[in-house]
Image: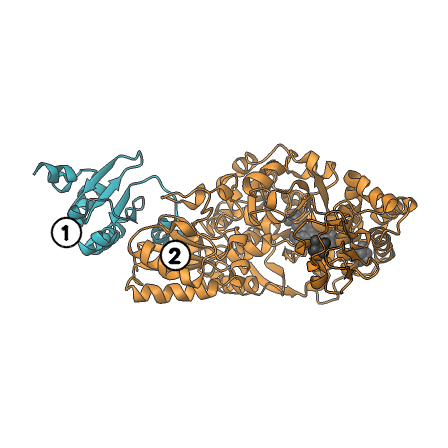
Chain colours: A orange, B cyan
Amino acid sequence: MQIYRAHVLVCAGTGCTSSGSTVLFEEFEKQLKDAGIENEVKMVKTGCFGLCAEGPIVVVYPEGAMYCRVTKEDVAEIVSEHLVKGRIVNRLLEGAGEVQKEEAAAEQSHFFKKQMRIALRNCGHINPENIDEYIAEDGYEALGKVITEMTPEQVIDVMLKSGLRGRGGAGFPTGRKWDFARKSPSDKKYVCCNADEGDPGAFMDRSVLEGDPHVVLEAMAIAGYAIGSDQGYIYVRAEYPIAVKRLQIAIEQARAYGLLGKNILGTDFSFDIELRLGAGAFVCGEETALMTSIEGHRGEPRPRPPFPAVKGLFQKPTILNNVETYANVPRIILNGADWFAGIGSERSKGTKVFAVGGKIKNTGLVEIPMGTTLREVVYDIGGGIPNGKKFKAAQTGGPSGGCIPASLIDTPIEYDTLIEIGSMMGSGGLIVMDEDTCMVDIAKFFLTFTVEESCGKCPPCRIGTKRMLDILTKITKGQGTLSDIDDLYALADAIKSSALCGLGQTAPNPVLSTLRYFKDEYIAHVVDKKCPAGVCKDLMRYTIVADKCKGCSLCARNCPVNCIQGEIKKPFVIDQDKCIKCGTCMDKCKFGAIVKE
Amino acid sequence: MKSLEELRALKEKTKAQMNLRNEQNGLRVVVGMATCGIAAGARPVMNTFVEEIAKRQLNNVKVTMTGCIGLCKLEPIVEVIDPSGDKVTYVKMDAQKAARVVAEHLVNGKIVSEYTIKAEENS
Ligand SMILES: Cc1cc2nc3c(=O)[nH]c(=O)nc-3n(C[C@H](O)[C@H](O)[C@H](O)COP(=O)(O)O)c2cc1C
Ligand code: SF4
Ligand code: SF4
């Protein structure tokens, strides 16, 4: 066995790969060789550490020093300073500039302090393409325990007691879902994994698949044992090539070790898993559409009941769980239901992973105990809002969810509380908005998404969401009336109660929740014909304040459509009919003579 | 793999390699590896620690490096730090001395007093 004194972990998740981590890996190998220490230092490609905005990320153990935004040029310094001489390169550390610590342990940084890693515990820690490393971190131990020591009823009992609820959006108790499927009599049953992850901006599931693919395989086998199934399918979007590749490697390795396939670990239990690639339609993440798609048909939802636990894939009892839901399962089996139920809040147990984006300093992936407040996520973990701007709202639940306004920033993040305030947990997208965000525009953004993704099968969704979008567009153009706002409410009601699937039923939520907390902004657009945040271009004017203008002509020379006229040393004027509202003039004026209103 | 025992055997084998990445409350061996330390022969000392520790499967001992401690003429310097932060400083180390520190101090908890900085100062 080769012995190493240091491990260099280079993130090979999608975020860091696109910011250049592959080149770094090769550069490290070269530099280590040049320094003659390639046999002392082990290079490992891992999954996402969660701090994508700071990528590419490199972590050097045993010190646990986390280097951020590493460039090819930095590699030589890390090798010669840290790996050869043992001096941590402070300037590249996470949070460098703020606090510089000699002994920088990754775990101590701000970003990680309030987090708790269950679903992401192996991400950024193990090499996802090496099953041995997964096994070394207790991998497949839970499956072994289940199939040798527990009955299916006991497994389901643990899941029920743990309080685990689905992480894919709806939050249905996982144990109950499994129990229904177990009790449905059939010669054949299926275990499916929803890795479709269609919410704009969400990448929690991708990170688990890329960083720890085996945890999903293990959990699905456990589910198979619990409900009496021998076949699993993972439905993953084809746009996730790294995740697909890692899953394929993981399945092959698990089969080679006999951890998938016939008679696992010498028992009577057999279970195998196949991948199915989705083409990336949002509606295919809906459970019945997903199953229709796996069957080889066009991915359209079908009416429920019958529920999948009774008649799902190929008309057989089927369970479908989200990637992150599965990622919790082996830990629950090993540590026990009480352990899990002790984490989080009264009605929401465990942790939740969020992809935090938008107007926030630390964009990336965070895993927090349920019940953590939005304030802690935004300010303590997220580092606050950049450029000294004010926090306005956060959006969760993507196109099915809603917003949480600044006045509710102390709301604990848990399933039921979020529903009560008109948002939802969703699958984990969390978009932070600052004072420069127009809430009507945000509602329009999400509705545009749903209109494009509606499968068109049922009229309320196909026609209704389009009508709502038309009204929003009208409002943002300054052509709305107060009765349009009433129409939005009426349409929302009708669609919610009559659409066939969750996509349509939840599509009005972003509109309803922005109306609930920011109705004054809608009114401003409709009555005053103004966009308070200055986003909606049709409601915006750039004008030159004559008193302040020195007549330097700088703005006129920079205007891309030449719509600013004037005489040198006299006030200039913007021709409003030709102005395209690009804002260039305002940026250029050295005297602050141009205002936006 | 035909049994849970086989799985566990593989786990134990790989675990030793993974330990480097885990937080643990064991001993820490810190080798001074600045230019002065390396010139004085810190590299073989470091490697001996790593190899001996792995050979004996001392899973709770971590070997790390540090820069110049400021006592260049006593290099190679090695500090052994226990979980409470108390440290023993060994000076003028070489590979053989390192092996002895592993056997006596790390395994049996007996400080090799003749290699410590105190012994050096008193001589
Ligand atoms: C339009 C629509 C899209 C969905 N997309 C996803 C998705 O991408 N990933 C996911 O896990 N669940 C998605 N869901 C939820 C699934 O239908 C289902 O509730 C979930 O996969 C169940 O797993 P869970 O109980 O583990 O959360 C979607 C639902 C709807 C209505
Ligand atoms: S609600 Fe929308 S997405 Fe769902 S079935 Fe109807 S048209 Fe299709
Ligand atoms: S750049 Fe400013 S000061 Fe100069 S002409 Fe334009 S508005 Fe007037």
Residue A317, horizontal then vertical, whole percent: 69, 54
Which quadrant of the view contains residue B44? bottom left
Q: What element carries label 1?
A: helix
**Is A63 rendered above or below residue A40?**
above
The C terminus of chain B appears in which quarter of the rendering?
A: top left
Q: Which residue is drawn at 81% across and 62% down?
A: A578
Mark 1 residue crowding within 10 angstroms, few (<14) / some (14–19) / many (20+): few
Q: What residue type is labelled 2?
A: Val
Q: Is residue A505 visible?
A: yes
Tell me the tag on residue B38.
none
Tell me the tag on residue B96.
1
Position of A520 with respect to B113 (left or right) is right
In this rendered view, identify the residue nearer to me: A89 or A233: A89
Whole-number angstrom distance, CA of label 1 to CA of label 2: 28 Å
In this rendered view, identify the residue nearer to me: A321 or A441: A441
Residue marked by disc 2: A8
| Quarter of the rendered structure image containing ligand 2 | bottom right
Q: Which chain carries label 1?
A: B
Of the two numbered discs 1 and 2 in the rendering, the one whose residue sits closer to the viewer: 2
Which quadrant of the view contains residue B101? top left
